[in-house]
Amino acid sequence: MTPILDIAGYSLDYATPAGFTRALDAVTLAVAKGEVLGLVGESGSGKTSLAWAIMRHLPESAREAGRIRLVDKELTTTSEAEIEAIRGRRIGMVFQDPSTSLNPTLPLGEQLAEVLEHHRGLTRKQAWAEGEAMLARVGLKVPAEMMRRYPHEASGGEKQRVVIATAFACQPECIIFDEPTTALDVITARQILDLFGELQAETGVASLYISHDLALVSRVANRVAVIHRGRIVEQGKVEEVFASPQDAYTQKLLAAVPRPDHRLIEAGPGPEAKVLVEVDKVSVRYGRKPFLAKLLGRENTQFTGNRDVSLSVREGEILGIVGESGSGKSTLARALTGLNPFEGEIRFAGRPIGGLKDMDRAYRRDVQIIFQHPDSSLNPRQRIREILSRPLALYGTVEQREDAKAIGELLEQVRLPAAYAERYPHQLSGGEKQRVAIARAFASRPKLVICDEITSALDVSVQASVVELLVDLQKRFGTAYLFITHDLNLVRQIAHRIAVMYRGDLVDLVDVADLSGGQVHAYTRSLIEAVPAPAAPASELPRI
Amino acid sequence: MSPAYILKRIVLVGYTLLVVSLIVFAITQILPADAAVMMLGENATAEALSALRAKMGLDASIWAQYGHWLAGVLRGDFGVSMRTGQPVGPVMMEALGRSLLLALFSIVLMLVLALPLGIIAAVRRGRIADLLVSVISYIGVSLPEFVTATLVVLVLADWLQWLPATGYVPLTENPLQGLRHLVLPVLTISVILIAHVSRMVRSELVDVLHTDYVRAARLKGLPKRTVLYKHALRNALLPTITIVALDIGYLLGGVIVVEEIFALPGIGRQLIVAIQSRDLPSIQAGALIMAATYAIASFLADIAYARLDRRIQYD
Amino acid sequence: MIELLRRVLRSPQGALGLVLVGLILLVVILGPWIAPYDPESLAPLQRYKPPSALFWLGTDQYGRDILSRLLHGARATVVMAVFATALGTLAGAVIGTISAFLGGRSDEAIMRTVDAVMAIPSLLLALLIVNLLGKSSWNALLAIAIAFTPGMARVTRSVALAVRKQDYVNAAIARGESARFIVWREMLPNVVAPIIVEMTIRVAFAVMLFATLSFLGLGAQPPASEWGLMVAEARRFMHLSPWMILWPSLAVAFVAIGFNLLGDGLRDALNPRT
């Protein structure tokens, strides 16, 4: 069968003041009709550059070699005007984040209809009628109303459906999906994936599915290509690549994917272990009553972050907290560290903590927090040395404070070279910055470390090494963790117990072993079902 | 846009005017000028002075005087000029009309020039056109009105003799002569505005052109022009509305200088005369009317913004 | 500091701005010494001379050398503007920081009042204040400082609030750092940079405002060689000898351009992530 999209020996360089940097190196791949090719790579691997190259959306600094062919059309030499006629009509694209890829000041319908008007020459009225039918087809309940809505009036899932409808609008031969579910919540992402499967089967469009998520690609693609530093290091049938990866990088990537059945920690502390922290009916409310609303007798618009949350962590235990964005999991972390006022009570090692004023030196030393984005949590104007010296100055021993090597030791503890002490945060990579944040948290030898989504901004392989580091530190110091994440597979690897939060409520608190099979809340069940099974060696994964 | 939003903005305009009235009154009342002495002259008898003070209410407490003045202002009565003996209100309002005409022409000229300049610079970023617009706007924002006025008078009135250097002819009397007299003042005021707004349009548009939704529109196959005018410009101009509203405050300051230089009898000129002759009621009225103009302009800008950007509902 | 200079020099605006402001500072410091003539000595025989080898920029209605007057006047114009801006920035920073720190209703009340004050055009506010205090350079300086205060309060507050939301501040709070440490070591270094940028650009504005006040006869008084005053005095002779009005006008514009460019260059240079 002749491929729809055929890329051969394609290389791409960007001109920089320091010379050319290579983004893509002799990429060769093809997608046939009805096929889904998964393109897997980490950030900076060149996967997005390839998408831009196919869409002919390259900066002026780009230098190319090789060819990109759409059926019979050589795209690299096609004129701008012809490309405009091909984009959106013969090749569609679905973008990563629907909240940024839709124009905030135009109605959703307009953004769909304009494509129909432009490419298919429909009148405005026809285009809107057709658009409405399309929205119905992508599973939107009230298509006519959705056409008139503005992006801020629709949910993330609804918006992504509109984007997908736009991509399919002109029945293109090929569609590029650029991480279409990454910005969505787990359950929404699953629904979008199902929609993708349906539409793909129905239209037989040649799909290039770009993702960093191996587990996900293993479920949606027929074939997979692994890209690393601009080169396709391995390509083949999904089952074959995952069952017996040939390239070292693929092997490493596969090993880094979190698998619930692959536990990274030993059994948790038994019931005889002492309870370290108890959260007793803690509620957090955000915002203040607006003055005018009160005046006009409107409803209180205060927003509830947590509602009567109760849980406990034993010494040396890892408690995972999962939930989608806005479920209140970070709010709890902030309450525990005195960043949010709360109602209810927290007991730490038996001591009652009713509020901010009870969080004394000892509590601050024993409870540490690590944030999601190290870019924000490390002061950009301080050297690593100064950043790490603060917990030592506050809680370190006299020897530590006077020992010039103490900072270096903290760095080595998180497997960074001691010489990094003299650098600024922006001189480090994302993973390295997060290690510095970990070192800072562990400097005071805390009893509880709260990890708030600390790996979600990192690549899979970096995430794996950070998690490994955390597990090591836990073994060494017996620290208890409150591990907050949206990644169910990851938390099943390293937590002893898992708490599930939904819209401010704690809906479940179960032992990891009881998660699948045991008595769990309906929401927890849908969460488990929504998560794509990881790319296990088992090749008989259910396919979409 | 909810009624609550509009109501809140109106309350804010009221608060602004209250604060301004307090400041203006405080500043003018501490002015080391005895109104009675000014009216009757240095040689007036003590009895005559105190009689006049009593008549003008100057012997009452400061707060009583403020209350009296404010009550008058709310009725539209700004008092009587100490210089001419005429009621201040009508004189100032008439002067305001002339100034608004000047401002209106300047804003129109600014929009006609600043938008295209900003758009060209943003679209041709890093090219000669961008550099040129950038140089022009750096020079433009760095020229105080009195310098610009000097230059345009030197060139257009003195050397080329195209236009009259000073004076004012009402448009109703002789439209052509009236317009000829307005050209130099309008040019002078617009220079800074054009420079500032074109820079803002450029930087907003550059940002918007880098957004995902503009790229998405291009990748849907829409032509460059459609993407620029339908998708990008709309979003880039929204913040510019706020900038223009803020610039109106600046424009009103510029009006003072320009009217003085070109002998244009607007509110700015009235204010300068009032300040130089320490005519308290005129100063108070002029300053309050200027601040009110600004407050109303920014109120309208807020409403326009909220109409155009559906995301803004309350704050 | 050297690192900062290097970064400023990297952008064309920064490099040009630095050169211009450097030149201006040289003139401010050395002006009186390098001036060829006494700026106030009258020479009835040398009146209205056009630029020549003897008088590079010509002479004025009293036969005073314009170049010498400009060189002397640099101090009156530039130093005053810098002081006025610094004073206004300081006052604004205090108000803005307090407002951001208090938060809630107090913050709203303070900021609404600041907005209200900003409804009076800066020039008008300065005019009213000078008129209240009396015509003089120092009063003009004070008036400009007061006129700048609300704007700087707004800028400071928004920067402080943005920094306050950063996780490194949260981390410091969670770590149990003292309020003093958080404000001085974590927040201040990040707040100061954008304020310095804003301040530099405002010096340009202050130079213009100060010259305008003098031009209107409310700032520096004769026989001072303040540039705005020189323009005002030269207006009567504009038709006769245009260079008299041209040179001081251009000098004001030159200074304003220099500080505007430097401000933009600093903005890029002080961003720690570029």
Image (tube, rainbow, N blue to C red):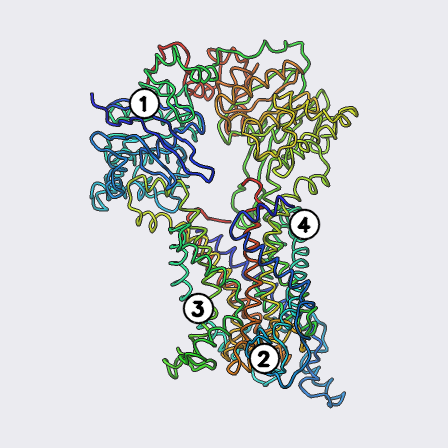
Residue A50 pos. (x, y %): 35, 31
Q: State which chain disc 2 sits on.
A: B
Q: Give the number of the mark in front: 1 or 2.
A: 1
Q: State which chain disc 1 sits on.
A: A
Residue B235 vertical position relative to residue A401 in the rendered view, above or below:
below
Q: Is residue A70 left or right of residue A254?
A: left
Q: Which residue is mark 4?
A: C98
Q: Give the number of the mark in front: 2 or 4.
A: 2
**Label 2's element?**
helix
Q: In terms of depth relative to the viewer, which is nearer, A74 or B146?
A: A74
Q: Residues within 10 Å of mark 3 (few under 14, many from 20)?
A: many
Q: In terms of depth relative to the viewer, which is nearer, A361 or C193?
A: C193
Query: Disc 3 or 2, which lies upstream in sequence?
Result: 3
Q: Which mark is residue B273?
A: 2
Q: Is residue B299 visible?
A: no
Q: How many numbered marks are there?
A: 4
Residues at discs 2 and 4 both on one chain: no
